[in-house]
Image (cartoon, rainbow, N blue to C red):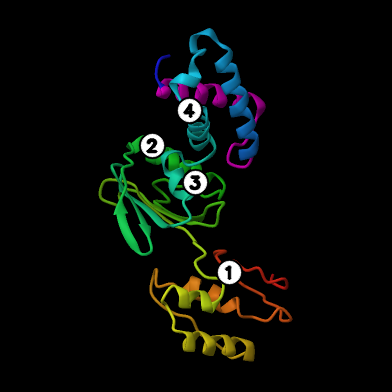
């Protein structure tokens, strides 16, 4: 065992075995997985064959990679951990894209068909949804509130198509939109006054136009004495209001 990669693979195998033996659900108990990883790394360090592990790989990196593989979304987890990533999609295994501030970019992540299927299965596990020839497309919500959409052949031409829409809190008040250049101060003051006055406000727009961000900013203007009741199919509203349900 003479490379960082082999050490990571060895620790991952140990962790997966321990999880199976203890009946741990890694997606629901990520903190327990952290403890198991620490134990397994300790066991690996104690063996003669890898007594120089600390010189072969950064233990923190090994632990993180194993946790991503076991309790996260593998090579995609880095994008879920990045608060600036708004959207992620896979057109084919070798072409994984992300979007930041409305701009798309091709990542360096390269997957296999098997990797894609395993990731989708892991993503759907918490939702209880299934994907097969009788159900060739699915919409689901991930534990962090992201929206998942998957389509498989023969609806698609050759590869599984995956899209994840993440909710990135960009503004908590209309005046936050002024700093971002979305509104000028006069418009922000007017909208804040409209919310405080209880006027009806309709928020509409196309995909990725910023409707949810704008709605959250408006709701940030609601006085603390008022009560907010939200009815959502997909839970994307994020408020610090004390009287919100």
- Residue sitting at 60 percent across and 20 percent down? 42
Secondary structure state at the residue bearing disc 3: helix
Q: Are marks 2 and 4 in contact (CB under 8 Å)?
A: no
Whole-angstrom CA distance, mark 4 to mark 3, is 28 Å
Closer to the camera in the image, 241 or 162:
241
Closer to the camera in the image, 114 or 111:
111
Whole-angstrom CA distance, mark 2 to mark 4, is 25 Å
Whether 85 is among the magenta residues is no
* Residue 24, horizontal then vertical, whole percent: 64, 33
In the rendered image, the vertical position of residue 167 relative to residue 22, given as above or below: below
Which one is closest to the eye, mark 2 or mark 4?
Answer: 4
- The local crowd at label 1, few if under 14, some if 14 to 19, many if 20 or more residues have their Cα within 10 Å, is few
* Mark toward the start of the polypeptide (4 vs 3): 4
Q: How many marks?
A: 4
* Residue 151, horizontal then vertical, whole percent: 37, 52
Report which residue position mark 4 lands on. Answer: 58
Report which residue position mark 3 lands on. Answer: 123
Residue 183: give its label: none
Secondary structure state at the residue bearing disc 2: helix
- The local crowd at label 2, few if under 14, some if 14 to 19, many if 20 or more residues have their Cα within 10 Å, is some
- The local crowd at label 3, few if under 14, some if 14 to 19, many if 20 or more residues have their Cα within 10 Å, is many
* Mark toward the start of the polypeptide (3 vs 1): 3
- Residue sitting at 50 percent across and 37 percent down? 68
Whole-angstrom CA distance, mark 1 to mark 4, is 44 Å
> Where are the magenta residues, as a range?
4-29
Report which residue position mark 1 lands on. Answer: 232
In the rendered image, the vertical position of residue 75 relative to residue 178, given as above or below: above
Closer to the camera in the image, 237 or 102:
102
């Amino acid at each position: 065992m003479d490379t960082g990669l082999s050490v990571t693979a060895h620790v991952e195998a140990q962790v997966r075995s321990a999880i199976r033996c203890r009946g741990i659900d890694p997606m629901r108990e990520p903190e327990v997985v952290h403890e198991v990883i620490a134990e397994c790394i300790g066991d690996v360090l104690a063996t003669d064959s890898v007594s120089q592990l600390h010189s072969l790989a950064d233990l923190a990196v090994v632990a993180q990679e194993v946790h991503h593989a076991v309790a996260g979304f593998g090579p995609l987890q880095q994008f879920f951990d990045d608060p600036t990533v708004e959207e992620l999609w896979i057109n084919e295994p070798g072409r994984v894209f992300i979007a930041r501030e409305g701009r798309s970019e091709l990542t360096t992540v390269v997957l296999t068909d098997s990797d894609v299927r395993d990731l989708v299965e892991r993503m759907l596990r918490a939702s209880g949804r299934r994907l097969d020839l009788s159900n060739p497309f699915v919409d689901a919500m991930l534990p962090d509130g992201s929206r998942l959409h998957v389509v498989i052949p023969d609806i698609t031409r050759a590869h599984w198509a995956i899209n994840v829409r993440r909710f990135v809190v960009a503004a908590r008040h209309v005046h936050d939109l002024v700093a971002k250049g979305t509104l000028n101060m006069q418009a922000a003051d007017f909208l804040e006054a409209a919310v405080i006055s209880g006027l009806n406000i309709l928020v509409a727009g196309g995909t990725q136009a910023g409707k949810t961000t704008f709605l959250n900013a408006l709701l940030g203007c609601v006085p603390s004495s008022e009560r907010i009741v939200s009815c959502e199919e997909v839970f994307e509203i994020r408020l610090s209001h004390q009287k919100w349900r």
